[in-house]
Amino acid sequence: MHEPLVDVKCLRHVYPDRTEVSLCGLELEIQPGEIVAVLAANGAGKTTLLQHITGMLRPVDGSVRVFGLDPYEDFERVRTRLGVVFQNPAEQIIGPTVEEDIAFGMGHLKLSSQELEKKVEVILQRLGISHLKGKVPHYLSGGEVKKVALAGALVTGPELLVLDEPFSQLDMGAVKALVSLLRSISREDKTAIVFTSHQLDPVALLADTVYVLHAGQVVTQGKPIEVFQQRVAFEQTGLQAPDLFRLVDLLQQGGMKIHADLDVEKVASEILAAAGL
């Protein structure tokens, strides 16, 4: 087992207005190349957790280590090795054009203008948004803004990619395309990914490991297929498992001998076989 890229233990934070977020039952590790999903109801601390991982916040209690460093104390050393896309990505796009915005994030690399242009063109092509190169970000659609922000996060080749609700406000086709893109990034670049989501279907397709948080504790963790079958844990947190798993659970309660799976076609085949069709 490699040393984890991210190691979080007993995290507690108090905001200036005295709002307290306690995740003191949390022990979270992210290994190199691993894709981790963090699930919880709204207000349970998902975004706060990511802000500590990226060094934007310092915990009152607990320990957060990223690349073996304190991300708050060693902010610059950590941030040059990770990419971040916030829940409202338009807020992090500051360049007058898409091309200039993506290039802005490489300022610390001391590259020539030709090298910068080449790197920007490569990431634009990879994300399929070369046609947006000279566009003014203010006039982009929501899906285009997400891709531009993702391009800016990926252009430096980060070891860790941090995404806050990356699938929000995307239609199903865009969700599937983003899942495919993130899987290829993880597989080809060995980039670890940690993301939050209130949509569980893309979590089932993307994550290697799922953490479910409730009342400052990790209620359950494991592979998606294991976690989504734990109906009691989901009811406790106010979350609902993906529809496919809920269907299988209901059919199993009715006496049908089928197995939960991430593959809808495989589940359909088992249902048809169990029904004698």
Image: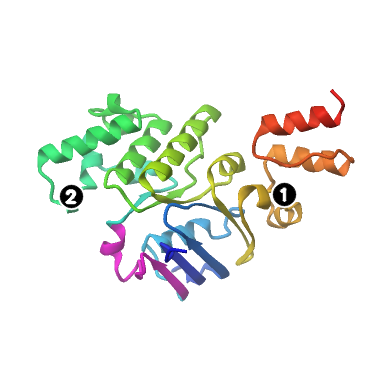
Element assignment for label 2: helix
Q: Secondary structure at mark 1?
A: loop
Colouring style: rainbow
Extent of the magenta region = 62-79
Image location (x, y in percent) of residue 255:
89, 41
Task: Using the rendered view, name the quadrant where residue 2 is placed.
Answer: bottom left
At a point 32% along the width and 44% down the height, the residue shown is: 154
Tally of numbered tags: 2
Q: Residue at x 69, y 45 (%)?
A: 241
Crowding at mark 2 (Cα within 10 Å: few <14, some 14-19, many 20+): few
Residue 69 colored in magenta in the image? yes
Q: Dots 2 and 1: beta carbons under 8 Å?
A: no
* Amino acid found under the numbered disc labelled 2: Gly
Q: Provide residue 181's location: percent of width, then percent of height.
A: 43, 36
Q: Quadrant of the C terminus?
A: top right
Q: Residue at x 13, y 46 (%)?
A: 111
Give above or below for 65 relative to 38.
below
Within 10 Å of disc 1 (Cα), the crowding (few <14, some 14-19, many 20+) is some
Q: Quadrant of residue 200?
A: top right
Q: Earlier in the sequence, mark 2 or mark 1?
A: 2
> In the picture shown, does residue 123 fall above or below 9?
above
- Of 45 and 223, nearer the camera is 223
Which of label 2 and label 1 is nearer to you?
A: 1
- Label 2 sits on residue: 107
Q: Is residue 237 left or right of residue 160?
A: right
For the residue pair 140 and 224, the one nearer the viewer reads as: 224
Q: Does the magenta-highlighted stretch encompass residue 163? A: no
Residue 168: x, y in percent?
Answer: 51, 39
Label 1, on which residue? 229
Question: Does the image show residue 175?
Answer: yes
